[in-house]
Amino acid sequence: MKTIGIMGGMGPMATVDLMKKIILATPAKTDQEHIPMLVDNAPQIPDRTKAILGQGESPVAAMVKSARRLEAGGADFIIIACNTAHYFLPEVAPQVKIPVLSIIETAADSVLAKGCKSVGMLATSGTIRTGLYQKALSAKGITCIAPAADKQHLIDDLIYDGVKANNDAYDTSAVCQLLQDMQHDGAEAFILGCTEVPVAVSMYNLQGDFIDSTEELAKAAVKYAKADKD
């Protein structure tokens, strides 16, 4: 089996969630049948959304260091526990010799397989701004519905003030109303397009037809790791 390298810390809880989903996606009956993982949990990587919005430094140098640590440690490929960070992947991937699987493409493939023609996008302002998912979904003939401009902050707040702050008592009533509004606008399902949002779904028992980008990446990583090693 190949060794999975996880570029983590963006954020720490999302990293643990990805690891857990890899383990759950692995058909194993003993410890020895599980896939080896190397995790570089680097929470000091600069905030990706702030960088995209021009409010903070670029995370590229820190991401390259993380990728190189994983490569040097023996990882055969890399996955990134952060959707927004994929905007910087074209600058990071060429600086290592091992491949990087894309959470964006694996999630988009899952939407296509599910048969949805229109999906809601629950992600950071940074990810929305980049158009990463919009482009990937459009190429497959799928419409991407983002929150109204004056409501996007509800998802950002859920991520930053809820999950990242480890706030168990966070009030999600406005988020629940937003999901209903997006369904009325035509969303057949929702992509959890930030690795913190699946954590939020679990923490706050949010209800909906969700496509978990973290879970889809985990399944793709397991499949890739179990393929014949070059």
Image (cartoon, rainbow, N blue to C red):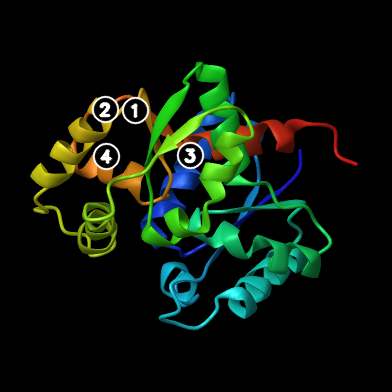
* Mark 2 or 4, nearer chain start: 2
Query: Do the CB atoms of the residues marked 3 and 1 lie less than 8 Å apart?
Result: no
Separation of marks 1 and 4 at Cα, in angstroms: 17 Å
Observer-nearest residue: 68 or 130?
A: 130
Q: Which of marks 2 and 4 is in front?
A: 2
Q: How far apart are marks 3 and 4 (CA)?
A: 13 Å
Query: CB atoms at circles 1 and 4 under 8 Å apart?
Result: no
Depth check, front residue: 35 or 61: 61
Instruction: Say if 167 sits above or below 205 in the image.
Output: below
Which of 140 and 225 lies nearest the eye of the viewer?
140
Q: Do the residues labelled 2 and 4 touch (CB within 8 Å)?
A: no
Q: Is residue 71 above or below residue 210?
A: below
Query: Looking at the image, is 4 positioned above or below residue 41?
Result: above
Q: Residue 213 carries which label?
A: 3
Q: Name the residue under label 4.
A: 201
Which numbered tag is attached to residue 183?
2
Front: mark 3 or 2: 2
The image shows residue 48 at horizontal and vertical percentages of 47, 69
Q: Judge the density around disc 1: few (<14), some (14-19), many (≥20) Cα neighbours within 10 Å.
A: many
